[in-house]
Image: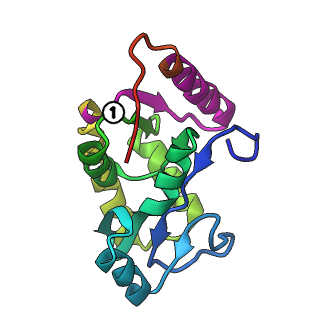
Amino acid sequence: MRKLGRPFHYVTTATTRPKRAREKNGVDYHFLSRKEFQQMIDKHRLLEWANVYGNYYGVPKDDITSALSQGVDTIVKVDVQGATTIKEILPQAVFIFLMPPSVEELEKRLRRRRSESTEDLALRLERAKEEIKSLPLFDYVITSHPNKLDEVISQIDAIIAAEKRRVKPRTVKL
């Protein structure tokens, strides 16, 4: 969506996990040391944070506050745990669950990445099965089929367009 020039603010989340080969600091994530991450926690600079698979992930609060104060639609990519926390803080936000067509397809995608050990892969798949049970938390669900990224983007565009036309629009303030 960013590459297509959609007029949104995309929040770059922070993590303590190691950077993968093709990732760029400040673009894919803010890659931080554990000490730097802990300082953000201590200074209340994260909207939400969690330890996931042994690494810390979090959403920088200033990034969201700045975009929302300018009236810019803001996209935050988090897992179900993060969405649950954010929903408690910002219940008026729109929540979209991106779902693989099947657990088998998710496993294929994860294996192609070659970034998880066999144990980590099994853990991720089990967690995915649990996360799917959290669908009632979300406002929308989009299934991400292989080689159909354009379809996912169109569906997200449609959701945003519909939300902007609500009789009683949602106002998200932090």
Based on the picture, tell me whether residue 143 belongs to the magenta stretch: yes
- Residue at the spot 58% in from the left edge and 59% down from the top edge: 112
- Residue at the spot 33% in from the left edge and 33% down from the top edge: 92
| Residue 42 horizontal side relative to residue 115, left or right | left
- Measured from the top left, where is residue 116 in percent x and y? 46, 70
Residue 125 lies in quadrant? bottom left
Please tell me which residue lies in front, 53 or 87.
87
- Measured from the top left, where is residue 62 in percent x and y? 47, 62
Q: Residues within 10 Å of mark 1 (few under 14, many from 20)?
A: some
The residue positioned farthest toward the right in the image shown: 4
Residue under pointer 1? 92
The residue positioned farthest toward the bottom in the image shown: 35
Residue 41 lies, with reference to residue 11, above or below; the image says below
Please tell me which residue lies in front, 63 or 116.
63
| Residue 45 horizontal side relative to residue 62, left or right | left
| Residue 137 horizontal side relative to residue 73, left or right | left
The magenta region covers 137-162
Residue 76 lies, with reference to residue 165, above or below; the image says below
Q: What's the residue type where badge 1 is placed?
A: Gln
Report helix, strand or loop for mark 1: loop
Based on the picture, tell me whether residue 169 belongs to the magenta stretch: no
Residue 87 lies in quadrant? top left
- Measured from the top left, where is residue 107 in percent x and y? 45, 52
Please tell me which residue lies in front, 66 or 157.
66
- Residue at the spot 63% in from the left edge and 32% down from the top edge: 153
The residue positioned farthest toward the top in the image shown: 167
